[in-house]
Amino acid sequence: MELSMVVDLGGHMFRTGLAGDDAPRSAVPTNKVEVYENGNYTKSLYGDDIYRSISKENIYGETVVNGNIVDFDGFKSIYENAMNQDIGLGAESRRLLFSVRHGISLSCLSELVTTMFEDYQSEAFNISFSVLLGLYCSGRTNGISVDMGHDITDIVALNEGYIDQDYIKTLHSGGREITYRLSQMLTKKYPNIFGEDMPAKYLEIVRDIKEKLCTLDPTRTGQNLANIQRNYELPDGEVITLDNEMINCPKICLQKIGFDGRHIDNIIADTIFSDLNDMLRKGNEILAK
């Protein structure tokens, strides 16, 4: 039986895996790096390859911005690397489910469909919104889905499986703020490593630390709240230790990410107690993704 693939086109991470798995088999950043030597452009690096070059001459950018692919050459490089090397099944002739942000542009969707069918001869290709799939995963069709991406957070109400366009809140803040907060903490704790003039590559390392170690609930991983401590090995082999930073850093998503000066939890509460109240009573669910 032909294996179906699931691809999550995030604002900062490109995740791929097999349908039915509990977790993605590949997760790489969507960043790109234009490498310069002596002022001359030499090549572009994508995905995990961005960690292989560090220079103040390099220009760092994105292949995905606000859920839209802005560099399709970079996207294809990341997709092929994930399918060929990380998963080992090849990029062509696949059955694919793409999870995208609900605000993705029609022009981006059109080019994405064309790319997958014409360049990779996909057997079947379906696109769905991440907020919708997140609610479906819980077995529900009514509720509020909170999708926090790299630079945008969407609070979306869904009624019987359909997005209610009148009840969408988009906050221009997301995981990026958590990364910056952690970089400030690490700069204070390890000034010789994470200095004020650290290159963008080091900010990517901070993001990787955030993804792997930070949590709002350390007890889920069996750690003692009073004695939480984890090590992280840097690319040069040096090891740093995190303790309270792992918990205090992500709290910013509840404290400072807001809309019109309000916190995200207040926005969700206002949505629940708005005209959506009758609809939400059908299932009485809130899903945070």
Image: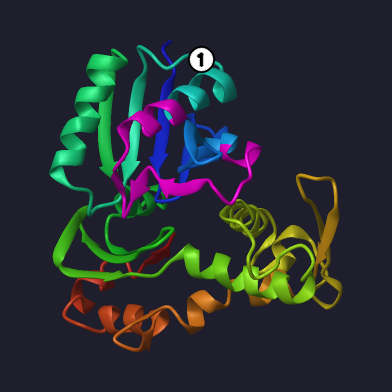
Instruction: Tell me, yes or no, whether the highlighted magenta stretch contains residue 218.
Output: no
Residue 17 vs 68, above or below: the answer is above
Element assignment for label 1 = loop
Which residue is drawn at the image coordinates 74% and 59% (left, top)? 221
Residue 23 vs 137, above or below: the answer is above
Residue 102 placement, left or right of 209: left
Name, please, the residue furthest toward the bottom. Answer: 261
Which residue is drawn at the image coordinates 67% and 56% (left, top)? 209
Residue 62 placement, left or right of 182: left
Rate crowding at label 1 as few (under 14), some (14 to 19) or many (20 or more) other CA atoms within 10 Å.
few
The image quadrant of residue 122 is: top left
Residue 154 vs 262, above or below: the answer is above
Q: Dot 1 corresponds to which residue?
A: 89
Instruction: Tell me, yes or no, whether the highlighted magenta stretch contains residue 74.
Output: yes
Q: Position of residue 276 (x, y in %)?
A: 20, 75
Q: Position of residue 159 (x, y in %)?
A: 20, 61
Magenta part of the protein: which range? Answer: 50-78
Q: Position of residue 166 (x, y in %)?
A: 13, 69
The amino acid sitting under disc 1 is Leu
Q: Position of residue 60 (x, y in %)?
A: 47, 49
Which residue is drawn at the image coordinates 38% and 52% (left, top)? 134
On-image quarter of the N terminus: top left
Residue 109 placement, left or right of 29: left
Answer whether residue 285 is visible to the viewer in this image: yes
The image quadrant of residue 70 is: top left
